[in-house]
Every structure is written in C-alpha cells, then in structure tokens.
Amino acid sequence: MRNAGKIMTVAAVAAALAACSPPNEQPSDLPPGADPTPSQAAQQPSPSAEQQGGQDQNREPCTAEDVEVTQSAAGEGYEVSVPQDCTAPTELLTRELQAGTGPAAAEGDQLDVDYSVIGWSDGEVKETSFGELGTLSVQLGDDDPQFTGWNEAMQGAQEGTRRLIIVPETMGFAQESVNPLAEETLVVVAEVVGIDPQP
C-alpha cells in the first residue's frame, strides 16, 4: 500500500507540472529562470523573414526629431543615436541644431563644412572632419552625382549653422560608386565654417 501511495503522489505531481506547462512547449532540463546555452538557443524557432518584414511595415518612418545628437566625449564632432522603433526615412530630412549668422547661402555659393557621417544601419561614425585639418567644400547648385543630398540639405545655411541631415539611400553616394556607404541611409551632422559668396 505504501508503494501504491508513492506512485499516486508521483503521478499527481507529474500531472500538475504538465498542466502548468504552456501548450506546444518542449520539456526542458533547465532549472527555473536559467537561460539556455547558445546551442539550446539555436534550436528555438526564430521569427521568419516574412514575419520580420511585416513588423517593419507596421512601423512609421523616423523623423529628424527622432534622432538624438550629442557632443562627442572627446569634444570634437558629434555622437548620434539612431532610433530603433521606426524605419529609415525615404526622403531627405533636416533639423537645425544651431542657428548661424550673416547672409544665407544662395545658389552658386561655396560652403566650407565640418561634418560627421553616420551609417543608419549600425549608428557608427563612418567619416568625420571634426578635429581634422581640412573641411569639405560644397558648392550649392553643383549637382554632384557622388552625393546628391548636399545641395538640397544646405540651402539657406549661414555661417555657424549646425544642421542634422538624414539622407536616404537614393540621395547619398551613387550606387555605382565604389564608396562603401553606397545604398546606405546616412545621418550627417554638418557645421558651416565659412561661406564664399559667388558673383
């Protein structure tokens, strides 16, 4: 009889555990709260590409206000935080970070610009002139086939203007160029160091 009682107790515990387990979940040897090892985690089903694509379609495109810009710890250049809860915009966006002074740049003027270029996909600085010896010269109205977004993005800038620019992949580096940032949405922080008006 004692053995029968033990068997009934074990059966009751097993039934209770089965009732507490979520449906379709495989039994696990892990203690409660323990994380699976990488090999065990690899066996877990991951969302399909179709499901992930559906999630992206449900998210709104990011705005220029969604991107956070802070001075870098070294004091030269800027750090950018790319948001993860919205998708890369498909049109050129700008936001004034600091107003400039003096005449606004017009078509044909040459701007000397300090800049940082950040990749949207990983949020890392890819190019920067802050703290370097030279600046980038941009002539408004010169439709540079290598980077078509500059002309539109810097319209109306003044000396001292600091501007956040989000450049969609179609307006960044030309797809046929050898630049590794081709076909990448870019975030640019540009600061106008000087303007050379053209007659």
Image (cartoon, helix red, strand yellow):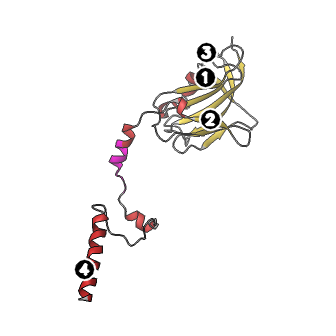
Give the numbered dot on residue 136: none
Q: Residues within 10 Å of mark 4 (few under 14, many from 20)?
A: few
The kind of secondary structure element at disc 2 is strand
Task: Name which of mark 4 and mark 3 comes first in the sequence.
Answer: 4
Residue 126: x and y, percent? 61, 42
The kind of secondary structure element at disc 4 is helix
Q: Which residues are magenta?
A: 46-54
Kindly indicate the quadrant of the structure image that contains residue 164.
top right
**Residue position marked by numbered label 1 in the rendering:** 154
Based on the picture, tell me whether residue 53 belongs to the magenta stretch.
Answer: yes
Residue extending farthest top: 199
Task: Name which of mark 3 and mark 2 comes first in the sequence.
Answer: 2
Residue 167: x and y, percent? 53, 31
Give the numbered dot on residue 107: 3
The kind of secondary structure element at disc 3 is loop
Amino acid at circle 3: Glu
Kindly indicate the quadrant of the structure image that contains residue 20.
bottom left
Asked whether disc 4 touches disc 1, contact meaning CB atoms under 8 Å apart, the reply is no
**Residue position marked by numbered label 4 in the rendering:** 8
Q: Nearer the viewer, mark 1 or mark 3?
A: 1
Asked whether disc 2 touches disc 4, contact meaning CB atoms under 8 Å apart, the reply is no
**Residue position marked by numbered label 2 in the rendering:** 69
Amino acid at circle 1: Met
Q: Nearer the viewer, mark 1 or mark 2?
A: 2
CA gap, disc 1 and disc 3: 10 Å
| Quarter of the image where the N terminus is located | bottom left
Q: Nearer the viewer, mark 4 or mark 1?
A: 4
CA gap, disc 4 and disc 1: 80 Å
Residue at (26%, 74%) from the top-left corner? 12
The reply to whether residue 62 is in sight is yes
16, 77: nearer the viewer: 16
